[in-house]
Amino acid sequence: MKTLWKQHLADTGAEFSEATDSDTVMHYGNPEREQEVAVSGTVFADLTHLGIIEAHGADAQPFLQSQLSNDINALDSSHSQLSSYCTPKGRMLGLFRIFRADDSFYLRLPANTLDTVLQRLRMFVLRADVTLEDASEAFIRIGIAGRKAADMLSGATGQAAPDEVNTVTRSGDLTILRVPGIQPRFEVYAASIDAAKGLWATLNVAAAPVGMPAWRLQEILSGLPAVYAATSEQFVPQMTNLQLVDGVSFKKGCYPGQEIVARMQYLGTLKRRMYLGRIATDEPVAPGASLFTGSDSEQASGRIVDAQPHPDGGLAALAVLQISAAEAGDLHLGSQDGPAFTLESLPYTFEPDEKG
């Protein structure tokens, strides 16, 4: 299915990453226009840059409950949730959107972290009746976003699209997730290439196809963190505001790093958190890049979570910063004299007790 789908995308004008054998769609000929439409119009995107881990077996649910930061026991087939996988020190190795179908749980995450996370999870299966495997080939992933996204999905499937964030519906071979965003956003998982092609053709009538950077721009503007290979083990969940987007349960039992996460929440020890901002450069900036204050050239004050081109210029970025540095301002990329990083407003507010 992977080869056939890549050929379908190529036939529709997709330009792929220059990385060897990459399946990631970068754009459809006009990346600047795609950035504009991603912010103001209705768009759809191939999400091959996201991989999927499947967990199934009689012990799949209790196993995941013992490993992840959110309450898997509260997840039913009509909802999805964000959740993280941490080291014993509370640092995130992976960050997932999880949904379930039949007896399986599906964990969506950046493809470049899948192998490492999957290998680590398998180390703790022991005698549990659970199988963990790369299920990226099982679904074609399509993202849809914009004011008309819900109506277009309804027209394509003949039923109402999910109307609340984190709800899930199904239509034939399509599983449809409503996900957070600055405008209505959906992730669709197609179990057959025919279903994916049919949906793509319907969307292509009145929406614009965009590449991975434009889709990640939407994630950034929506204040949704991600953990990539370069930022693995860098952040505790609260540093990326994961508790503010329903990615952490403080009522469930133990999981790796739970004591650290709980202590940070209840003792008010949070000294870093994630901010939205704009970097005054058009050059690519990778996750994990350092930010400095103008007064300190020695010690980095933060790290980039993700950054993508913004249609108004520069790069929109999410960054985990020292709270004191964010409040002082005068932040720069790479060095104290590097491109300025200017704070902007997230689409949600910090909790009063998280002032640091």
Image: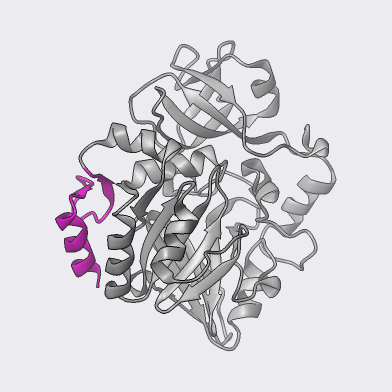
Q: Is residue 116 visible?
A: no
Q: Position of residue 47 (x, y in %)?
A: 36, 56
In this rendering, the answer to whether 61 lies above or below 3 is below
At x 73% / y 60%, what residue is drawn? 249
Report if residue 43 lies within the magenta region: no
Say above or below: 69 vs 24: below
Q: Which residues are magenta?
A: 1-28
Classify residue 202 by image quadrant: bottom left
Q: Is residue 19 magenta?
A: yes
The percent coordinates of residue 175 (x first, y second) are: 46, 71
What is the quadrant of the N terminus in the image?
bottom left
**In the shown orientation, is residue 313 left or right of residue 76?**
left
Residue 231 percent location from the top left of the image? 49, 44
Looking at the picture, does residue 167 appear above or below residue 335? below
171 vs 130, left or right, is left
Q: Nearer the viewer, residue 42 or 155?
A: 155
| Image quarter of the C terminus | top right
Q: Residue at x 51, y 48 (%)?
A: 226
Q: Classify 288 as above or below 204.
A: above
For this rendering, which residue is in front, 34 or 222?
A: 34
Quadrant of residue 129 in the image? bottom right
Instruction: Say which quarter of the image contains residue 238.
Output: top right
Q: Where residue 23 appears, x then y in whole percent?
A: 25, 56
Q: Residue at x 82, y 36 (%)?
A: 352
